Image (cartoon, grey):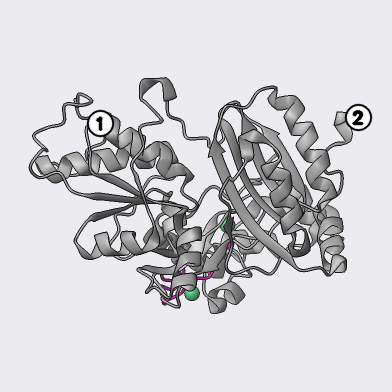
Amino acid sequence: MDPHQLRNLYGPDVLRARLEREGVERTTLSFYRYVRLAEVEVLRHVLYQEWEKLGVLGRIYISQEGINAQVSLPTADLAAFRANLDDREAFRDVPWKIAVEDDGKSFLKLTIKVRKKIVADGLADDAFDVTNVGTHLDAATFNRKMEEGALVIDMRNNYECLIGHFEGAYLPKADTFRGAIEEVVGMLIARVQGCEGARATDVNLQPSHPPTLALSEPEILLYCTGGIRCEKASAYLKHHGYNKVNQLHGGIIDYARQLKAEGLKSKYLGQNFVFDERLAERITDDVVSTCMQCDAPCDRIGNCHEATCNMLLVQCEACAQKYADCCSPSCREIHQLPMETQRAWRKGRSTRSTRTKAINDPEGLRRRIREEEELLALNGTLHPELSKFTSKIIPSS
Ligand SMILES: [Zn+2]
Ligand SMILES: [Zn+2]
């Protein structure tokens, strides 16, 4: 087959309708492995052909350093997919993690991308030994070490921690993995030296020669969504001289599965942010966040519906109604215009197609909303520039 045909050619509406029609039970699962892969381009096309036949949808990254996959497939084909993976030396016995909360609509299409790295972490791998990772812990051991007072660190970005996290965990403020890992090293140093807000890059820290930590070095517990980021994070921390580094094996996704299977008590509270259509899967009924617009307890997460904004926010039902699923009155005003006017207004403005940014200053957002509401009451619009589109497109009666 022509490799150019080995990709999805349909729009999201067609795909969603097709998935609705399909009517078979699907399972969402994820797996990754750091493993040397040769002829990655060729492998990509072969995998696409084989997995498309099995009804696999999802997002897969492959690179010379391995594979990172989040997929959904007909539950009836799970065994066939397992056999397909096991047929290849590189993927044999790769552990997969099945999502607990699943309506089968987590992915609309199959994409397999060849990347330089399977996780875009922004770290220079040759600067440290990526294979010198921390100790992998199962859910029960992770819980026990938490009870013994270990320091729990969330290795996800700020917006992923919003709606759920382990009790008492350190939650990074950074919105990239690299930012988070540097912030964490800074935090660890600050714990010892008493200097708040330091970053790894600010402090002259010699690897394998940490500042008089030996006695006070905390036992560290790292966790992330599926475990993959902790592979790099733990190696990075060990490179910086920390020895008691542990990581949650299989991440929050597998922690949730182990809780169910073994009847353990969850020390993770709230929802787990996931990178598919679902946005989140619920682990416990705890609500750890508040609505960014009215500050009421809430962990409903979504994107601002104004396409040029698309910011992630925590928004309660009442505020979603009030602001028409938008982050602010100014976004709402655009979103509620006739479609042609919206298009005209959007021309030349870039749209944010991915949900990689979240509102990180809810206080500031609430202030902005108050100011915008006042202005709106005064002027009847927050977008005076709209007059030139509306007069052209909607003829005045
Ligand atoms: Zn609200
Ligand atoms: Zn917005």
Q: Is residue 30 left or right of residue 236?
A: right
Secondary structure beneath label 1: loop
The x, y position of residue 304, in whole percent, is: 60, 60
Secondary structure beneath label 2: loop
Up the image or down, 172 lies above or below 87; here it is: below
Up the image or down, 155 lies above or below 318; here it is: above
Up the image or down, 204 lies above or below 33; here it is: above
Q: Is residue 386 left or right of residue 194?
A: right
Q: Is residue 295 magenta?
A: yes
Q: Residue at x 69, y 51 (%)?
A: 82
Residue designated by label 2: 2
- Indicate yes or no: mark 2 CB to ligand 2 under 8 Å: no
Q: Is residue 395 magenta?
A: no
Residue designated by label 1: 240
Q: CA distance from mark 2 to mark 1?
A: 48 Å
Q: Which residues are magenta?
A: 290-302
Q: Quadrant of the C terminus?
A: bottom right
The x, y position of residue 317, in whole percent, is: 56, 77
Q: Quadrant location of residue 9?
A: top right
Q: Nearer the viewer, residue 339 or 371?
A: 339
